[in-house]
Image: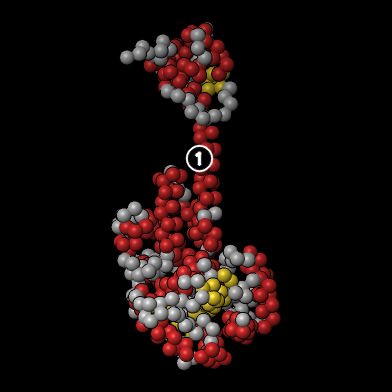
Amino acid sequence: MTDRHPLDLPELRPLWSAVHDRLSTGRPVSRVRSGPLDDAGREALADLLGLDRLPGTEPTIPLAGLDHAVLDACGRPVRDVVALILGPIHDRAAERERRTGQRDALWEWLAGHEVVTAQPALLDWVGHLRTTGLVDGSPDRTRGLLTAALTVLAALPADGEPLPVLAARLLDGDSHALDDGTRLSSLVLRALAVLYGTAVPDAAEQRRALWSRAGVADDGLSSSVLAAGLRPQGGGPVAEIARICAGAGHPVSLTLAQLRAPGDFTGPAGPVHLTENPSVLALALRRFGHHCPPLVCTSGWPNTAVIHLLRRLADDGATLYYHGDFDGEGVRIAAHVLAKTGAVPWRMSADDYRAAVPRVPVGPDPGRLTPAPWDRALVDSMAELRTAVVEEVVADLLLDDLAEHRRR
């Protein structure tokens, strides 16, 4: 056991504590206020400083004078002495700056993550998380939780997996990681609510509905996708059904259950066009009949069956072209489809929007706007003109594009 420092006296502890605290601020220190000192402390301080009378009970002491007195008493500066008596002197200002830098770097990382940049509506989620602060005050713990949430969001919409199965597959085998009420589950559900433009669910039934909308434990029969002109190769039942409907000039509705087990099925190579609204698909069938080019409808926000089919077509070599409504919701749906399927925009630029607005001079307001990752100028134009343009307004242009692709 080491000997105590000769100046480590109980009556001087209030003084050393005050000096240690002031030096730990990381700011320049010229004076230190000590106390309250009892009579023994006042006598000890007077002896240390060589005073001819006792100081008050809460004296303010020039640090330079104290340092000189401590050097005379033990040959070491006051900073070294208080560190030996009370432990290392920290730089709280530098520590605050370091923690601020860590927090800023964390939120910058989150805002720039590919899952967020692909669907900028999630920036509202990032903003909310920033206001709520760090998990247990720890940047590392917060980053770990956010990394898990981003892993889940990147995998959604799911392919009808039960929630525990999805969690185990994505999160190191932990089937309970997304259980209702966990911090991670709440984090992901808030992101989904922001994406879909719905209220954050506050009841178990609402939370289950939101998970279902994201393809978790989806009903294989109620989730379906509408298509036209789809002529896949293969002798499986799904390929045959699609070809029969295309040959007759009819749409085909395929359920998630069928798409999960299609049998022999290879999607068509070449372009496949995607629309947000069924009315555009109906107009295409009216114009082209049994010659309709491949066309898939997302029917608004795409369900699991839609995403499943589009990914299958892309894997089989199709190039996907997406068009949707020019309003706030339409931009978010488009960003979602592009991020989840690899589709590219089809007549969805700022120039396309500006050219379409004169067709609806008194159109509805586009509502809440979020950035379009494929064209940063698009939302600026929509904010300026404040006019929504639904797909049906430009349907003739879309059908002309389909006709051109048929000729090619």
Is residue 175 found left or right of 356 in the rendered image? left
The answer to which of 23 and 334 lies nearer the viewer is 334
Q: Is residue 408 visible?
A: yes
Q: Is residue 146 left or right of residue 395?
A: left
- Quarter containing the N terminus: top left
The residue at the point 48 percent across, 65 percent down is 194
| Nearer-the-camera pick, 211 or 295 | 295
Q: What residue is drawn where x is 46% and y is 92%?
A: 248
- In this rendering, is residue 110 above or below 258? above
Image spot of residue 262 (x, y percent):
36, 77
Q: Position of residue 193 (x, y in %)?
A: 45, 66
Tell me where residue 207 sits by quadrant.
bottom left
Q: Residue at x 61, y 81 (%)?
A: 408
- Relative placement, left or right, of 370 versus 193 is right
Q: Position of residue 341 (x, y in %)?
A: 49, 68
Indicate how the structure is coloured in the image: secondary structure
Lateral position of residue 291 relative to residue 236, left or right:
right
**Can the viewer see residue 306 in this picture?**
no
User: Is residue 275 or residue 393 the one in the foreground?
Assistant: 275
Count of numbered tags: 1
Q: Amino acid at mark 1?
A: Arg
373 is higher (above) or lower (below) than 34: below
Indicate whether 135 appears above or below 266.
above
Identify which residue is drawn at 42% across, 18% down.
85
Q: Dot 1, how many residues are within 10 Å of its Cα: few (below 14), some (14-19), or many (20+)?
A: some
x then y, percent, for residue 162: 31, 66
What residue does disc 1 label? 99
Circle 1 SS class: helix
